[in-house]
Amino acid sequence: IRLSLVGSEMCIRDRCMKARPVQRLRLRLPAWAGEGGGPVLAHCGWRAEDGTWHDEGEMALAAIAERFAARRVEAALHPADTPMRTFVLPPLTGRRLREAVLGAVEPCALQPVEQLVVAFGPRDARGQVPTAWVARDTIGGWRALLHRHGLPVRELHLPTAFLPMAAESATAWPIERWLIVRMGAAQGFVHWLPEGEDRALALAAQAGDAAPEAIRWLDDEPADAAHWSGEGWGWALPA
């Protein structure tokens, strides 16, 4: 038994020595498919000590946990799991604001609000409150799965959170037929792109009166890690 324990300790120590130490590790999770399937693949990016971001591509969660020794792990949900809407609400605070948000979400959601985790950002000068919701089972499933793989997270981020913020314009990134758009420090949305739909027209239609004059399309840029580099998004879904 002692030899077995010593061997296990040496294996763990050897794995830690091989793992790349990184300041921050970010994951873009796939759509939640429930427990019991095969290895779960996620896209990952990491931040070096000098602040630069690097894209590592798609890897199994177990392989990610083995390859990196991260000071902090952050994960963003898939757009298919995370509807995002902006509601115009009166200037309320505290519990009254949350009740108003839940009332606005209820007719839009496919499940009773009691089965959802709902989060919202600050109300802006036009009375707009950015809001997102996700099934409670999805939050619980990801939290448990990430923890089992040694990738614990304090919260689950929205798809828009990792995009960089562009001054007086929007940042857009198309992925898997989805359009992810960030418009400022706390505003953004996700939009499904049907086959043949013009992405710029879809963005303008979805944004409505808040449509930006300029759009920064990250997939048109040579740097392949810009979609990991966003900072300053101040609200998320508690894990």
Image (spheres, rainbow, N blue to C red):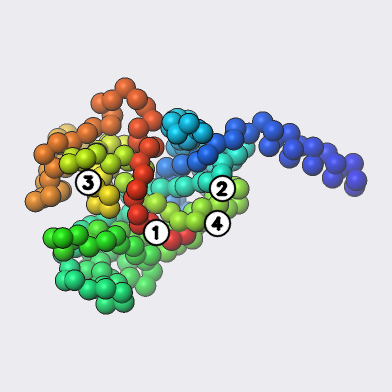
Q: Residue at 36%, 44% (x, y): give it.
A: 231
- Label 3 and label 4: CA atoms lie apart by 31 Å
Residue 158 vs 163, above or below: the answer is: below
> Residue at the top extreme?
222
- Label 4 and label 2: CA atoms lie apart by 10 Å
> Residue at the bottom extreme?
96
> Residue at the right extreme?
2
Labelled pair 1, 2 in contact (Cβ < 8 Å): no
Name the residue type under label 4. Answer: Ala
- Tag of residue 1: none
- Label 3 and label 2: CA atoms lie apart by 29 Å
Label 3 or label 1, whichever comes before in sequence order: 3
Judged by depth in the image, the label closer to the viewer, 3 or 2, is 3
Q: Position of residue 26 (x, y in %)?
A: 46, 41
Q: Residue at 34%, 50% (x, y): give it.
A: 233
Residue 106 or residue 222, whichever sits in front: 222
Residue 225 or residue 177, whichever sits in front: 225
> Residue at the front extreme?
50
Q: Secondary structure at mark 4?
A: helix
Residue 175 vs 116, above or below: the answer is: above
- Tag of residue 151: 2
Q: Secondary structure at mark 3?
A: loop
Q: Position of residue 195 (x, y in %)?
A: 20, 36
Q: Residue at 73%, 40% (x, y): give it.
A: 12
Q: Residue at 31%, 74% (x, y): give it.
A: 94
Identify residue for label 1.
Answer: 237
Label 3 or label 2, whichever comes before in sequence order: 2
